[in-house]
Amino acid sequence: MSPVTTSPAVASRRHLRDVHPRLTFGGTLRSEWIKLFSLRSTWWTLGLTVVLMSGFALLQAYGVGLMLDGRIPAGAPGATSEQAASFEIIGAEVVTGGYQVGVLTVAVLGALLLTGEYSTGMIRSTLSAVPRRLSMLAAKALTITVVTVGVSVVGLVVAALVSAPLLSGHDLVPALDDARTWQVVGGMTYFFVVAGLFALGLAAIIRSTAGTITAVVTVLLLLPGVLQFVNLDWVQDAMTYLPLPAATSFLSVSNAFSAASPLAAWEGVGVVGAYAVVALGAGAVVLRRRDA
């Protein structure tokens, strides 16, 4: 009888079963969780996120109090206190006032989750233990999602507590029975998650901590800040589809803090989410095709 031949693909699968007989997604996820929280930089980044969110909420609550007391006019220069009082202010927007800075620290954490392994060479050990690269990337994505939701909740609670004494005098403490409160806090958490996943996707492509963070900061903060001064209609239209301007469509529910977004809330959700989807998709392709 002639010997039975085995295809390379079947042999590869058998090799994986022999070398990694207990390799499961749950095990991969657990290892990513342990690696993330074994780093001091993780705790510093999470702590900084909570501190920044709380600090900006406190400053914004103080500024809103001055404005409503008539000591800082709202709107155009020279506006009266009556015009200031006509501004609708939602307490949840005050509490989430630090989201533009918090989203940056979360994105840095998302980048470090992968670039940190490339900078130390640990990525080779990771891929030896988890040869299914997409499984590894999915585990990292789920890890950063859970951590981001957690730090968002903690940051929101602390920010609400520290700003409550200033907001209570103007009846601006966020009401839990107000749908707009949940839109703002849920939208902020969603934006944080997208930023972390976007940074993770770019990290899989760029593989450099400095390069990834530079790209993330440019897309999230620098481009909107620079392009707002370019007085061309097509530039302003294009800027609407950057993550930060698009996020205002569901994060701003009053006229107190920013101009109305041309996008509907659901459109902004889709635009912002697309950044994470595209970055992770491109990162997955590069991760499979390029050697560690």
Image: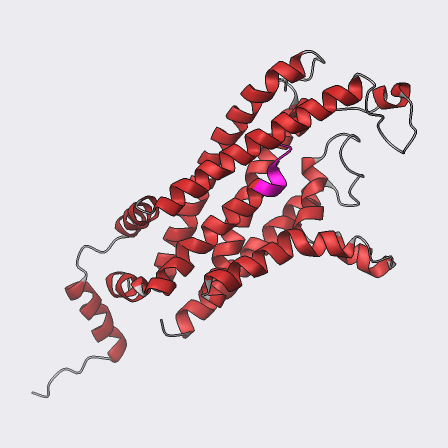
- The x and y percentages for residue 25 are 30, 52
| Quarter location, residue 251 | top right
Q: Quadrant of the N terminus?
A: bottom left
**Image coordinates for residue 85, horizontal then vertical, percent:** 84, 19
Query: Which residue is found at the position 67% from the left and 55% from the top?
Result: 222
64 vs 109: above or below: above
Q: Which residues are magenta?
A: 95-101
Task: Residue at 23% x, 73% y: name it.
Answer: 12
Mark yes or no: residue 241 visible: no
Is 67 left or right of 285, judged from the image as shown?
Answer: right
Q: Is residue 97 found inside the magenta-colored segment of the image?
A: yes
Please name the residue shown 21% across and 75% down the image. 11
Quadrant of residue 78 within the rendered picture? top right
Q: How many marks?
A: 0
**Can residue 217 be seen in the rendering of this structure?**
yes
Q: Nearer the viewer, residue 190 or 13?
A: 190
Tell which residue pokes out farthest to the left in this image: 1
Q: How is the image coloured?
A: secondary structure
* Magenta-colored stretch includes residue 155: no
Residue 211 x %, y %: 52, 64
Q: Is residue 188 above or below residue 136?
A: above
- Residue shown at 46%/68% (left/top)? 285
- Nearest the eye: 252 or 11: 252
In the shown orientation, is residue 196 left or right of residue 44?
right
- Left or right: where does residue 248 sit relative to residue 140? right
Residue located farthest toward the bottom when viewing the structure as drawn: 2
Q: Position of residue 225 (x, y in %)?
A: 73, 52
Q: Residue furthest front?
A: 71
